[in-house]
Amino acid sequence: MRAFLVTAEEGSLSAAARALNSSQPTLGRQVSALEDELGLALFERIGTKLTLTPGGLELIQHARAMCDAATRASLTASGQSQSLEGTVCISVGEIFAGHVLPPIIEKLRMQEPGIEIEIVASNSSSDLRRREADIGFRALKPTQPDLIAKKVCDLTSRFYASSGYLEKIGYPQTMEDLCRADFIDFDDTGVYRKYLNDLGFNLTPRNFPVRAESHFLQWELAKSGVGIVTALEMIGDAEPAMERALSDFMLVHSMWLVAHRELKTSRRIKMVFDFLYREFKAICVSC
């Protein structure tokens, strides 16, 4: 049933297989077995996409309810565990994970050697409700009622570029000067450009000639003189090869530590949650 649900959500067996960390043939066999058992065709193929048949549409809500119930049962079981041994999965943005998290994890491992840590370093938010991660570090307060969020601090981000690039464009002093520079974008949706223009810039698509989803790659591109990138002040100011592109301009955003409500009753998860909160809080205070 879960194979059916994820295939319906992803639109293809290959995408569903990646989401479930399975193989496409295995997933195909599971969906076919469900169709045989029910005596019902669940999908029809249109081009490269799978779409639900009328029978599949009727079944999808029941499948989702079953999977949600199974997830809740798993969460309850995890919440009842009082052991300080086991795995805790932490979801955090990749550049923050690479620059800030390692010494914190080293300290945690020394304090609690029975706890294994899995880190999802990604700019996409893991779904805590579906157990893609146990604890998440977020730039926005979640609105879902079954998540618990604790504000850690306010962090400051700024524009950074290599000294060579800033010298080449004449060390911009105003927002208007910066509108003649190249920025490194995340994707081709224009969301980042709109965000900056809402803050008073007048940027066009020509200001974003290079795109990279990876923050690490963005940072390395900027260090090589490709353009301007946004980064946390605590990371940007510590890099000798980089300078602030507009020293008096900054972006302030709140940072939240998030966990599922039922997971907070687990001694293991609660211990890691509280430990991360203290360590992140100390970093923010020192900055």
Image (cartoon, helix red, strand yellow):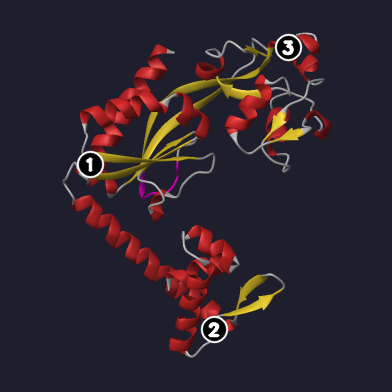
| Residues packed near mark 1 inside 10 Å, few (<14), some (14 to 19) or many (20 plus) | many
In the rendering, at what x and y percent does residue 154 appear? 46, 23
Query: Of the residues under marks 3 and 2, which one precedes in the sequence?
Result: 2
Instruction: State the CA–CA distance, disc 1 to disc 2.
Output: 43 Å
In the rendered image, the residue lying farthest to the bottom is 39
Above or below residue 164? Residue 181 is below
Which residue position is annotated with label 2?
55
Which residue position is annotated with label 1?
268
In the rendering, at what x and y percent does residue 12 appear? 60, 67
Q: Residue at x 62, y 12 (%)?
A: 241
Depth check: give the residue in front, 213 or 255: 213
In the rendering, at what x and y percent does residue 192 appear? 68, 34
Q: Residue at x 44, y 13 (%)?
A: 287
Above or below residue 144? Residue 72 is below
Range covered by the magenta-colored residues? 142-147
Residue 271 in the magenta stretch? The answer is no
Q: Amino acid at mark 2?
A: Gly
Depth check: give the residue in front, 165 or 46: 165
Q: Residue at x 47, y 88 (%)?
A: 36
Which residue position is annotated with label 3?
164
| Residues packed near mark 3 inside 10 Å, few (<14), some (14 to 19) or many (20 plus) | some
Q: Amino acid at mark 3?
A: Gly
Instruction: Describe residue 7's horizontal placement relative to residue 269 as left or right.
Output: right
